[in-house]
Amino acid sequence: MKRDIFWKIISPILLVISVILALMLGAEKVSLAAVFGQGDKFENIILWQLRLPRVLLVLITGLLLGGSGAVFQLFFRNPLAEPGIMGISSGATLGAVIASIVPGFMALTGKGGVGAYISPVNLCAFAGALIAGLFVTSLAFSRGGKSSSVMLLLCGTALGTLYSSLSSMLLLTCNKELHSIYTWILGSFNGRGWNELLFILLPSAVSIILMFIVSRPLDLLTGGEKSAAALGVEVDKLRILVLLCGALAVSAGVCAGGTIGFVGLIAPHIVRKFLGPRARTLVPFSMLFGATLLLLSDTFARIIIAPGELPAGIITSILGVPFFLALCLGGRK
Amino acid sequence: MNKKRFFTFFLFICLLSALYARKPKAADTGYPKSIVALSPSAAEILFTIGAGDQVSAVSEFTDFPPEAKAKPVVGGFDGKTLSLETIMSFKPDLVYLTERMHNFLIATLESNGIAYYVSKGDSIASVEREILEVGKITGHDKEAKKVVDGMEKKLSKVAEAKKGTGAVKVYWEVWNAPYMSVGPSSFIHDVIKAAGGENIFADLTDAYPMVSEESIIARKPALILIPMSTGMEASAVGLRNGWSDIPAVKNGKVFVVDDNVYTRPGPRIADVVVELSALLTK
C-alpha cells in the first residue's frame, strides 16, 4: 500500500519533469529570456509558435493512447488489445495515403482552403480513423451473444489487414515518392502546431471523459461478461462506449502524431506492475505514463540528429521495449 | 560420370555467360537494337542523343520527349512494380537501370547474358558522364558530346554570372507532414548549388531527411521551393504558424516548381539551373 502511494505521487512528478525537458530541449537553442517573451524574434517564434503547441499535442496524444490502451485491455480482457488492433490505425493510414495521392485533397492548401491550416494528410487520417472506428463500433451492434467481443477483435484485425493492403496497393500503383508517406506512417509530431491542437481538443476531451465513465463498470468486468451482467453492468452499452472512446482517441492521436501504436499497448502493462489491475487506478495512471513516455520519445526524436529529426514512433519502442522487458522478466523471480 | 560431366559443362556455360554479361556492350554485330529504359531520365537521355529508334520499351512516368511517351511501358520505375517477364518479352540487348532501385535485376540479367547499364544520376557531373558513356555504348558519341557541350555552355554562363555574389539560402520542401528536405547526397542539392544557391540543410547526411521545423525557421531561407507533385500551394506557406517572418515568405519568394524536371537527372538539367538562377536573383 505504501508502495502504491509512492508511485501515485511520483508519476505526475515524472510527467511534469518530462514536459519541462521537452520545452527546454530542441534542434535550436532558446534562451531563458524567450520564456518571458524577451528573446529575439525567432526565439520567441520557436518557443511559442512551434515548441509549446507541439509539446501540448504530444502530451494529449500520450494521455489518449495510454488511457485507451488500458480501457481496451480491460474490456477485452486481453493483454494484447489496444485500439490499433481494431483496424483503426490502419484506417488512418489509408486516409493519409488517399490524401497524398488524390490531387484534389492537396489542392485544399490554397488560400481559403481548410488544408492551409491543417495538412490534408492529417485531416484525412483523422477521417479515416474515425470512419474505421465507427464501422467497427457498428459491428458491435449487429452481433449480440456471448462471443461478440471475440468476434469484434477478429473482425477488427481482419479489417485492419484489409486497410493496410489497400494502402500498399495505392502507394505502389499511384505514387512515385513512397519515401514521404512512409515517414508519415512511422509516426511523428513534426510540423504539427496550434491548429492541430485546436482541432483535436473536442474529440480528445470527449474520449477522456468516456475513459473515466467506463472505468467504473470495467472493474466489474474482470470476472467475465456474464458475471458482470449479473452485477448490473449493461455489457452491450459498455462495449459501444469503449469502442467510441478508442475511435475518438486514435483519430485525435493520429491527426497529431501519425500512427503511434506501441504506447497504448505498453503503458497499461507497466502501470499494472506498480499499481495493480484495478481499472479506476489503471486508466488514469496509464494516461500519465503514456504521456511521459511519448514526451520523452518525442524530445529524443527532436534532438538526437538535430537539425534532422527521427520519427517519434521509432524512439517510443527503442526506449520502451528494454524497460518493458526488464519489468516482465524481473517480475518472474 | 555422365552426370558429373554434364554438371561441369553447365557450370562452364554459366561462368561464360556471366563473364560475357559483365561487358556493357552485348551486341556482337554492333550497337544495342532493343534497349529497355527503366527510368524517365534514361529514356530522355537516349532520345536526346538520337538513340530513340533503339529503345523498345520505357518505364512508367516517362513523359519526355513525346516520342518516348509513345513507347510501350514495362511497369513502375520504382522497381517494386516492375515485371521481369515484361522486360524479357522485349528481348532486350541492353537494360538501362538506376542505381539502388533496380540493382535486384542485375543477377537475373547477368545469368541470362543480357547487358545492362547502371545510371547513378547523383550530380550534374555524373549526368554528363552518363550521357557520354551511353553515347559510346549506343553508337551516338558525337551527338552525346554535342548535348554535353550545350549543357556545359549554359552551366558556365550561370557560374560566370553568380561570381562574386553570395550564395542565396534555399529551402527545398520535399513534404510538409512531416517536414522533409534534401541533404547533400541528393541530386537537387547539386542543382541548387550550381544555380548559385545554398541548401540550408547541407549539413545533413541523409538524402531526404526529416527536418526540424525550428531549424527551417532559424536558418532563415531567402527562397523556398515547393515541388509541384506535392500539390501544395505557395500561398499556404505563409499561413503556417511562425513562418510569416521567414525572409522568403516576407519577400514573396516561395515558388512551386515542376519537380518532374527539377529532380530528373537528364539533359534538361542545365535549363533548370538557368531557370533557378533567375529565381534566385529576381
Image: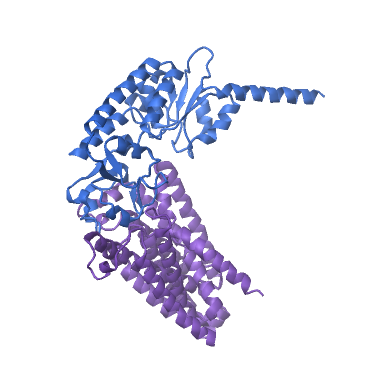
The furthest residue to the top: B29
- Residue B175 vertical placement versus B70 (above, below): below
Residue B262 location in percent, x, y? 31, 36
Q: Can residue A3 be seen by looking at this rendering?
A: yes
Q: Quadrant of the N terminus of chain A?
A: bottom right
* Front residue of B155 and B81: B155
Q: Is residue A21 left or right of residue A322?
A: left
Hey, which residue is sitting farthest front in the picture?
A: B164
Quadrant housing residue B108: top right
Q: Quadrant of residue A151?
A: bottom right
Q: Residue furthest right?
A: B1
Q: Nearer the viewer, residue B114 or B220?
A: B220
In the displayed structure, B206 sits above or below B34; it is: below
Chain identifier, purple in the render: A
Task: Give the chain coloured blue.
Answer: B
Horizontal and vertical percent for residue B69?
36, 28
Compared across the picture, whether B53 is left or right of A317 comes to left
Q: Is residue A216 visible?
A: no
Q: What colour scheme governs how the chains and residues are painted in the rendered image of this protein?
A: by chain
**How far from the left and from the top, in percent, is residue A324?**
55, 68
Quick check: B6 above or below A281?
above
The quadrant of the rendering that contains the C terminus of chain A is bottom right
Q: Nearer the viewer, residue B161 or B241?
A: B161
Residue B263 sits above or below residue A322 on the image: above
Give residue B270's position: percent from left, percent from top. Answer: 30, 29
Q: Residue at x 52, y 16 (%)?
A: B27
